[in-house]
């Protein structure tokens, strides 16, 4: 199992945190991981993306040019990364903020109104975690339990009060894409 992931949005949307959570969860599960951040010059409010590679084998390179999954949180990120997802890959879109529509038929496209759903949960800043929950449910690359454990490392201690709303957001994102078998 090898997942090469690009997560992209504006600085302040939790793009880096999402990547760190996947990487920490992978480490907890004994997988090979890499996490490579990339910031625009503005940082908060500017563009930000990170590449995460997670594998059952050691990771040879942290560079991701044609990801198996792209998670995009805004229009500029959609424009930059939508065409880079490899055929057969996964494109997860925060459709609350991304107004563009993909015309690709060779990738699975999941659109989630993550910002709107996060506001309904009482904290618009957990939109990233809703998308992360959907990604984890679809790929099973790591477990939600490992992500929840990783929240304790990624969030500073003064933000640990946000762990509960992040758990709710993970569950909500997973529930939105889960398929019940009868």
Image (tube, rainbow, N blue to C red):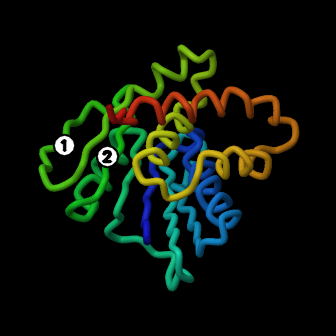
Query: Which comes sooner in the sequence, label 2 or label 1?
Result: 2
Q: Is residue 61 above or below residue 166?
A: below
Q: Is residue 134 above or below residue 176?
A: below
Quadrant containing the C terminus in the rendered view = top left
Name the residue: 52% across, 64% down. 52
Left or right of residue 125: residue 101:
left
Name the residue: 54% across, 55% down. 41
Q: Which mark is residue 148?
A: none
Q: Nearer the viewer, residue 168 or 63?
A: 168
Name the residue: 68% across, 26% down. 165
Picture coordinates of residue 48 (x, y %)?
Answer: 51, 52
Picture coordinates of residue 139 (x, y %)?
Answer: 42, 53
- Which residue bears the numbered disc 1? 102
- Which residue bears the numbered disc 2? 78
Name the residue: 78% across, 52% down. 153
Secondary structure of residue under mark 1: loop
Q: Are marks 2 and 1 in contact (CB under 8 Å)?
A: yes
Secondary structure of residue under mark 2: helix
């Amino acid at each position: 199992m090898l997942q090469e992931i690009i997560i992209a949005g504006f600085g302040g949307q939790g793009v880096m945190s999402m990547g760190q959570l996947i990487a920490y969860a992978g480490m907890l599960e004994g997988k090979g991981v890499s996490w490579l951040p990339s910031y625009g010059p503005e940082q908060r409010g500017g563009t930000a993306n990170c590449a995460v590679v997670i594998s059952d084998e050691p990771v040879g390179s942290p560079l991701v040019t044609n990801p198996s999954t792209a998670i995009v949180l805004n229009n500029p990120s959609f424009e930059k990364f939508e065409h880079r997802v490899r055929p057969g890959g996964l494109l997860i879109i925060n459709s609350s903020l991304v107004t563009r529509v993909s015309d690709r038929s060779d990738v699975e496209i999941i659109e989630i109104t993550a910002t709107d759903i996060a506001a309904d949960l009482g904290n618009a800043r957990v939109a990233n975690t809703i998308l992360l929950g959907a990604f984890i449910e679809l790929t099973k690359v790591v477990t939600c339990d490992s992500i929840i454990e990783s929240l304790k490392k990624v969030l500073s201690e003064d933000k640990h009060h946000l762990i509960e709303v992040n758990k709710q957001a993970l569950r909500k994102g997973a529930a939105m894409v889960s398929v019940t078998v009868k």
